[in-house]
Amino acid sequence: MTRFIGTIARGIRAPIFKNGDNLTEIVPQLIIDAANGEGFTIRDRDVIAMTESIVARTQGNYASCEDIKNDLLIKLEGREEIGLTLPILSRNRFSLLLKGIAAAVKKVIIQLSFPADEVGNRLFDDNLLSGTTINPWNDVLDESLFLKEFGKSVHQFTGIDYVKFYREIVEDAGAECQIIFANDCRKILNYTKNVIACDIHTREQSIAQLKASGAEFVIGLVDILNTPTTEHGYNEQYGLLGSNKATETDIKLFPRNCQSITDKIAKKMHALTGKTVEVMIYGDGAFKDPVGKIWELADPVVSPAYTPGLEGTPNELKLKYIADNEYKDLSGEEQKKLITERIKQKDSTDKAIDSKGSEGTTPRQITDLLGSLSDLISGSGDKGTPIVYIQGYFDSYAD
């Protein structure tokens, strides 16, 4: 039978999950109900993708600004000032972290990268740099020089002046605030020897550089609320990284023990359907907005857990390259036959059989690709589809 459709991704409507809900029982039943209601068949190598948010919600993995403050007070051991290097510009991701941190000290020095933060939120248009003598790789700007050269900073999408916003958060917490602008995290050491590296994907490098350059106290956001406790949420691996604003005083942390959840759901699906369905948990999708230049990956990883069948990168051939080069003089049916055989030959090996035939295919991790697809399907608003069911992703033209 000829197949007319390749990959399909369906957003699965779900209840509003709450603390204590059993995802390993609820999610498989939601998929089965959706299949029965919408008339699709569950197949081997289908993929269930769940947002990290519903996992953290069902775990009750929440903490307050007060919890952040108390944990940091223990780690600071009496130190009364702290430098924060390269935080992202975000109400959702960083404002409450800053509030909790500021409450633990008397002075906060914030070092912002420019012209944009790590994930692409811009303080000002890149083109404004070309009219100055400022070296963004070496120079340090104070607020007055920043304002003179670039004017007030207003975020393109949110309309927030993050320089003003972050200052107000620190001062409202009762601490003195100083803001500098520099892209080398080590510049903070001219102002304080006590530092929290607030960057996400370059954090290990930053911490190593700070320690090697004379910092006396250095931790990352991964080191706050990373100790198991029954008093509030925590994440042993990522600490505050991956957290989101939940209320005006509370954050939802990145979920814990994710591998156990994905494995149990896969096992339950096999028990109920006899099919081997892959399962993953995803956060940000790791794609870049072409207008705002924002790279959508404020989480520490796209997928904190997934079943073994999602390991690795795609093994694909570039159909249009083969058709335009090797089989360009053949008829449509001859092309189809030979390309199909070529794909079958490729599928019997560990990787594509030649580099030219696979050139231009996507080398990203499968979970990163599926995470991007799922993030776009589920959205972050009111769709009510925190679970995405993907079919045909591993199919090829030869199937």
Image (spheres, rainbow, N blue to C red):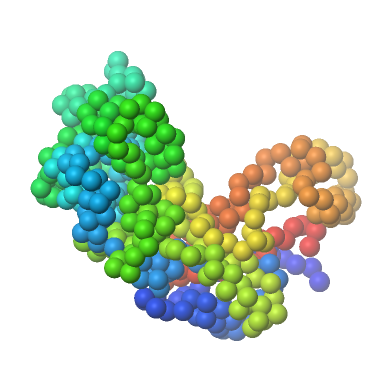
Q: Is residue 40 left or right of residue 352?
A: left
Residue sitting nearer the eye, 173 or 215: 215
Residue sitting nearer the eye, 325 or 65: 65
Placement of the N terminus among the 4 image quadrants: bottom right
The image shows a total of numbered marks equal to 0
Q: Residue furthest front?
A: 77
Placement of the C terminus among the 4 image quadrants: bottom right
Is the residue 347 above or below the residue 1 in the image? above
Task: Determine the residue positioned at 23% across, 46% down.
Answer: 77
Image position, residue 119 (x, y; %):
40, 42
Residue 147 seen in this snapshot: no
Quarter where residue 226 is shown: bottom left
Residue 239 seen in this snapshot: yes
Quarter where residue 280 is shown: bottom right
Is the residue 320 above or below the residue 302 in the image? above
Task: Determine the residue positioned at 34% across, 65% down.
Answer: 229
Quarter where residue 141 is shown: top left
Q: Is residue 328 left or right of residue 285?
A: right
Q: Is residue 340 left or right of residue 261?
A: right
Q: Residue furthest top?
A: 133
Image position, residue 307 (x, y; %):
62, 64
Is the residue 322 above or below the residue 272 in the image? above
Image position, residue 164 (x, y; %):
17, 41
Task: Determine the residue positioned at 80% across, 58% down.
Answer: 398
Task: Determine the residue positioned at 40% across, 59% down.
Answer: 235
